[in-house]
C-alpha cells in the first residue's frame, strides 16, 4: 500500500530519492555542457544532452553544425579525456532543430506614457457629453475627470 502523506522538499530532493538522483544528473550534465562549450568554436549551436556508457551525446541545431562538430570531434575527445572524462570513448552527434529556433521572448513593447488631458480638452469633452446618450455621457465625463486628476 502506498504512503500518500505529504513529504518535505528536503526529503524529496535527498540524495537517496529518485528526484535527488535526477537533480544530481541534471547538474552534472549542465557542468559538462559548460566545459564542452568552452572547448568548441560552435558552442552557440550545440549542447550536451546525455553521457552514458562512455558515449557523450551532443545535440546540434542542424546538419551543417553537425559537420562542423565532426571536424572538431577528435580534438574534443582528446581534451575531455585529459580534463574531465577519462573514460570517454566516443561522441554521438544528434540533430535537434529546436535548438535553431529563437526562444520566445516576453512581450517587450514599451509602455507608452500618455500625455495628460488639458483643461481645454476636458471642457470640450464635458460640452460634448451634455448632448450625448447616457452611456457615452458617462464615459466622456470620466475622460474629462482625468484632466483634474493629473493636475
Image: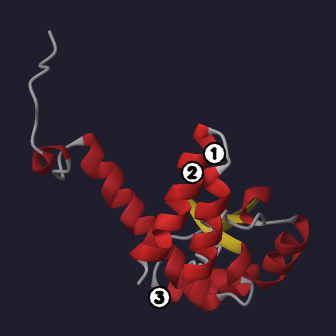
Q: Is residue 7 above or below residue 53?
A: above
Kindly indicate the quadrant of the structure image that contains residue 79.
Answer: bottom right
Q: Residue at x 67, y 58 (%)?
A: 128
Q: Secondary structure at mark 3?
A: helix
**Nearer mark to the viewer, of 1 and 3:** 1
Q: Residues within 10 Å of mark 1 (few under 14, many from 20)?
A: some
Using the numbered discs, state the Cα–Cα distance from disc 3 to disc 2 in whole angstroms.
Answer: 71 Å
Question: Which residue is identified by label 2?
Answer: 139
The N terminus lies in which quarter of the figure?
top left
Q: Are marks 1 and 2 in contact (CB under 8 Å)?
A: yes
Q: Residue at x 18, y 44 (%)?
A: 12
Using the numbered discs, state the Cα–Cα distance from disc 1 to disc 3 in whole angstroms.
Answer: 74 Å
Q: Is residue 53 above or below residue 149?
A: above
Q: Which mark is residue 92?
A: none
Q: Residue at x 58, y 75 (%)?
A: 111
Q: Residue furthest top?
A: 1
Whole-percent x, y for residue 83 in the image: 47, 88
Question: Which residue is identified by label 3?
Answer: 83
Nearer the observer, 54 or 132? 132
Using the numbered discs, state the Cα–Cα distance from disc 1 to disc 2 in whole angstroms.
Answer: 5 Å
Among the two numbered marks 3 and 2 on one chain, the one whose residue lies closer to the N terminus: 3
Whole-percent x, y for residue 3 in the image: 11, 19
Q: Is residue 129 above or below residue 108?
A: above
Amino acid at each position: 500500500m502506498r504512503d500518500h502523506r505529504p513529504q518535505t522538499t528536503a526529503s524529496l530532493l535527498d540524495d537517496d530519492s529518485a528526484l535527488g538522483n535526477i537533480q544530481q544528473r541534471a547538474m552534472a550534465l549542465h557542468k559538462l555542457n559548460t566545459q564542452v562549450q568552452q572547448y568548441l568554436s560552435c558552442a552557440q549551436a550545440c549542447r550536451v544532452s546525455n553521457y552514458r556508457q562512455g558515449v557523450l551525446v551532443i545535440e546540434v541545431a542542424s546538419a551543417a553544425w553537425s559537420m562542423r562538430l565532426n571536424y572538431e570531434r577528435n580534438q574534443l575527445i582528446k581534451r575531455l579525456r585529459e580534463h574531465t572524462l577519462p573514460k570517454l570513448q566516443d561522441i554521438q552527434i544528434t540533430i535537434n532543430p529546436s535548438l535553431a529556433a529563437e526562444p520566445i521572448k516576453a512581450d517587450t513593447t514599451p509602455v507608452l506614457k500618455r500625455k495628460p488631458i488639458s483643461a481645454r480638452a476636458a471642457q470640450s469633452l464635458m460640452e460634448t457629453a451634455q448632448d450625448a446618450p447616457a452611456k457615452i455621457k458617462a464615459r466622456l465625463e470620466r475622460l474629462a475627470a482625468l484632466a483634474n486628476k493629473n493636475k
